[in-house]
Each structure stands twice: as structure tokens, then as C-alpha cells.
Image (cartoon, grey):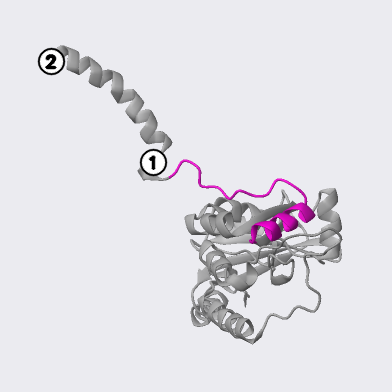
């Protein structure tokens, strides 16, 4: 009898290990944003018919900050839940045919650029920077309110956008409070390099990493059809912390930096 029980345990153990490896620490196997598989206009119309906000991220395959957000921000449970439950999220490659047209239409010059529209199709937010999961969740939560999520029953020859629609004083007040809170809560970085060539920016990052333990990233931006690269260093919770470190870099390492 004991031998029989032992055989069953041996047979079950490998399966148990496989299941544990596929679902470590009790996390859900799939923790991904369900980005819309379709066109900009289709996604926008879907947001209206479902009473959800419309979220758009302009990106490119070579955009380092975009890839960083894919691996961190868009894997955060709170961000994933917000986007999947209350938004119709869409990623737009600026090098695709549709992406090029919309990049021009919305004057996208920095990657990533994030646009948020109400369910009625009115743009209420434009962000031109990399967002941490904390910043993204704060942004999504702020805009997730009943005024921005109204189900639109589309009629033929009727636009989902209401001309001259006003945000209203109460929402303006909330928006001002959000901007103030974001200014004090956001992480500050130091810009320690500016290049028109990615190879030079990469060399700068490599040299800095040999001497400093602080996180260092390269941020891309478009200016007059050219790509520029900013080397950003550190993560500081307050302006004072960033300023203190800027002085340290200048006095001890002769490195000029500006607060970003």
C-alpha cells in the first residue's frame, strides 16, 4: 500500500512543478493589455458604443522608452485592469501607413506620445513622455469618471463628437488638481546628454554605467523629421533631490546636467 501511494506522489510531483512554474507566486498567467486589433477610427467608434474612453499610444519598434513601458508600465496589474476594463486601448506604429497619417494629423514629434479621448471622441489628454506604472495608473484613474464614459448610440450620418462641447468647471478644477499633484509626485531625472546620433548616445550611456549605479535611459523625440536622443539619469521623487544630485555631478564629476 505504501509503495502504491509513493508511486502516485512521484507521478503527480512533476505535473505540480510544471503548474507552479507556469504560474509563479500565484500570479495570473496572462497579465497583458488587450490592445485593439483594428484601425484608429474603428477603435474610436468601439469606445463610443461601449461607453469607454479611447487610449492611443504612438510608438515605433526602435523607440527604447516605448519598449521600456511595454515591459514595465503595461505589465502593471492596476494599469492592465484600468485599460482593459474602462478604455479601448490602441497602439499605433508611426511607421505604418495609418500611423504616418495620424502622426501628421496630431503633430506627433516625440515618442511615446499618448492621447486620451472621451467616449464621445473629444481629446482630453496629451502626454509626451515616458510614464511609470504609478504615473500611468494615476492618469487613467483620473480620467475614468462618468462624464467621460457615456455610451454613444451611433446613427447614420451622425458624428460621435459633439461640436463645442465644454468640459465643465468641475472637471476643469479636478484637472488642475491632478496636474499639481502630478508635478510633485512624478519622478525627476537629470538630462546628462543630448545627441542626434543613437550610437553616440549609446556610448554616453555605457560610459556613465561604468561609474554610476543610478538608472540611465535614452529618450527619443522627433523634431523637424529628425530623431534626437536625450540621455537621462537617476530617478528622484522631489525637485530638491534632483537639484542636490545635479550639483554633486557638477562639483565632483564635472558633468553638466539639467533637471528633466
Task: Return the residue at label 2.
Answer: 2
Residue at the far left in the pictured view: 1
The answer to which of marks 2 and 1 sits earlier in the sequence is 2
Q: Nearer the viewer, residue 163 or 254?
A: 163
Q: Report the disc number at residue 113.
A: none
Q: Residue at x 58, y 57 (%)?
A: 83
Q: Is residue 144 magenta?
A: no
Q: Is residue 51 magenta?
A: yes
Q: Is residue 179 above or below residue 65?
A: below
Task: Return the residue at label 1.
Answer: 24
Residue 257 appears at what percent x and percent y?
62, 75
Quadrant assignment, res 50: bottom right
Quadrant assignment, res 206: bottom right
Element type at mark 1? helix
Q: Is residue 39 visible?
A: yes
In which quadrant is the C terminus drawn?
Answer: bottom right
Q: Is residue 134 above or below residue 42?
A: below
Q: Please provide the residue range marked out in magenta.
A: 28-52
In which quadrant is the N terminus drawn?
Answer: top left
Q: Is residue 86 above or below residue 187?
A: above
Amino acid at each position: 500500500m505504501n509503495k502504491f501511494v509513493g508511486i502516485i506522489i512521484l507521478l503527480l510531483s512533476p505535473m505540480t512543478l510544471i503548474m507552479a512554474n507556469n504560474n509563479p507566486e500565484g500570479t495570473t498567467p496572462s497579465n497583458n493589455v488587450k490592445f485593439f486589433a483594428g484601425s484608429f477610427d474603428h477603435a474610436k467608434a468601439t469606445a463610443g458604443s461601449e461607453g469607454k474612453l479611447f487610449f492611443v499610444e504612438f510608438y515605433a519598434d526602435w523607440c527604447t522608452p516605448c519598449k521600456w513601458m511595454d515591459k514595465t508600465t503595461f505589465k502593471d496589474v492596476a494599469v492592465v485592469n484600468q485599460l482593459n476594463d474602462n478604455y479601448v486601448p490602441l497602439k499605433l506604429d508611426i511607421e505604418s501607413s495609418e500611423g504616418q497619417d495620424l502622426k501628421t494629423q496630431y503633430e506627433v514629434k516625440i515618442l511615446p506620445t499618448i492621447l486620451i479621448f472621451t467616449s464621445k471622441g473629444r481629446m482630453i489628454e496629451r502626454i509626451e513622455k515616458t510614464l511609470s506604472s504609478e504615473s500611468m495608473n494615476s492618469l487613467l484613474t483620473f480620467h475614468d469618471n462618468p462624464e467621460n464614459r457615456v455610451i454613444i448610440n451611433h446613427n447614420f450620418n451622425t458624428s460621435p463628437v459633439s461640436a463645442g462641447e465644454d468640459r465643465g468647471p468641475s472637471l476643469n478644477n479636478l484637472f488642475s488638481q491632478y496636474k499639481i499633484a502630478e508635478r510633485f509626485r512624478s519622478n525627476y531625472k537629470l538630462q546628462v546628454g543630448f545627441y542626434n546620433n543613437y550610437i553616440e548616445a549609446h556610448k554616453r550611456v555605457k560610459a556613465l554605467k561604468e561609474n554610476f549605479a543610478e538608472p540611465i535611459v535614452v529618450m527619443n523625440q522627433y523634431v523637424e523629421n529628425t530623431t534626437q536622443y536625450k540621455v537621462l539619469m537617476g530617478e528622484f521623487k522631489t525637485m530638491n533631490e534632483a537639484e542636490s544630485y545635479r550639483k554633486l555631478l557638477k562639483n565632483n564629476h564635472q558633468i553638466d546636467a539639467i533637471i528633466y
